[in-house]
Amino acid sequence: MSENTESSSNSLDMLKWLLVFGLLAGVVAFNHFFPELSVLYIALVAVAGVGITGFIASTTVKGSTFLAFAKDSRTEVRKVVWPTRQETTTTTMIVLAATVVMSLILWGLDGIIVEVVSFITGLGI
């Protein structure tokens, strides 16, 4: 019994996904074939089409799983302790200083290696 319900649910979900992609293709086609229309009308059709396809997609198993994931992610983001402006500025300055120091070290090593290779090969680069 559960296998039968699962297969009918999967086929209904497949139909919904086909409808979603068909509607999105219709929005793209509308934008392509009616460029002379006002941008307002094109935008309204695009927003309505994306809204309808979003609603249809959210009724599928994968869509409802995605919505649950998005809600959980939003909850977790609210739990994050964000750094203060002073902490962010200090960390940025440390990263910039480390980058400058490492670039100077690599520049110096590159110069030494070029001199050694030109000495060994006898080429005056």
Image (cartoon, helix red, strand yellow):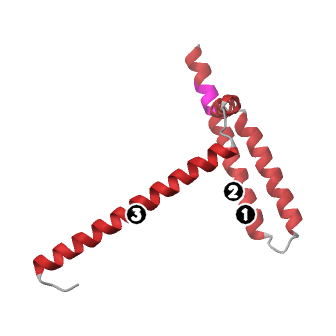
Type of amino acid at the residue the image marks with label 1: Ala
Query: Is 103 part of what is drawn in magenta?
Result: no
Disc 2 + disc 3, Cβ < 8 Å: no
Q: How many marks?
A: 3
Type of amino acid at the residue the image marks with label 2: Ala
Q: Is residue 125 above or below residue 78?
A: below
CA distance for labels 1 and 2: 6 Å
Disc 1 + disc 2, Cβ < 8 Å: yes
Q: Is residue 50 above or below residue 70?
A: below
CA distance for labels 2 and 3: 49 Å
Q: Residue at x 49, y 57 (%)?
A: 97
Q: Is residue 13 left or right of residue 109?
A: right
Residue tagged by mark 3?
103
Q: Residue at x 63, y 46 (%)?
A: 88
Q: Is residue 27 above or below residue 58?
A: below
Mark found first going from the N terminus, 3 or 1 = 1
Residue tagged by mark 1?
29
What range of the chain is rendered magenta? Answer: 7-12
Mark found first going from the N terminus, 2 or 3 = 2
CA distance for labels 3 and 1: 50 Å
Q: Count neighbours of disc 3 (C-alpha within 10 A) and say few if under 14, some if 14 to 19, many if 20 or more.
A: few
Disc 3 + disc 1, Cβ < 8 Å: no
Q: Count neighbours of disc 2 (C-alpha within 10 A) and say few if under 14, some if 14 to 19, many if 20 or more.
A: few
Majority secondary structure of magenta residues: helix
Quarter of the image for the C terminus: give it. Answer: bottom left
Q: Position of residue 65 (x, y in %)?
A: 64, 30
Q: Is residue 56 above or below residue 42?
A: above
Q: Secondary structure at mark 3?
A: helix
Q: Secondary structure at mark 1?
A: helix
Residue tagged by mark 2?
25
Q: Is residue 44 left or right of residue 106?
A: right
- Would you identify the image quadrant in which residue 72 lies? top right
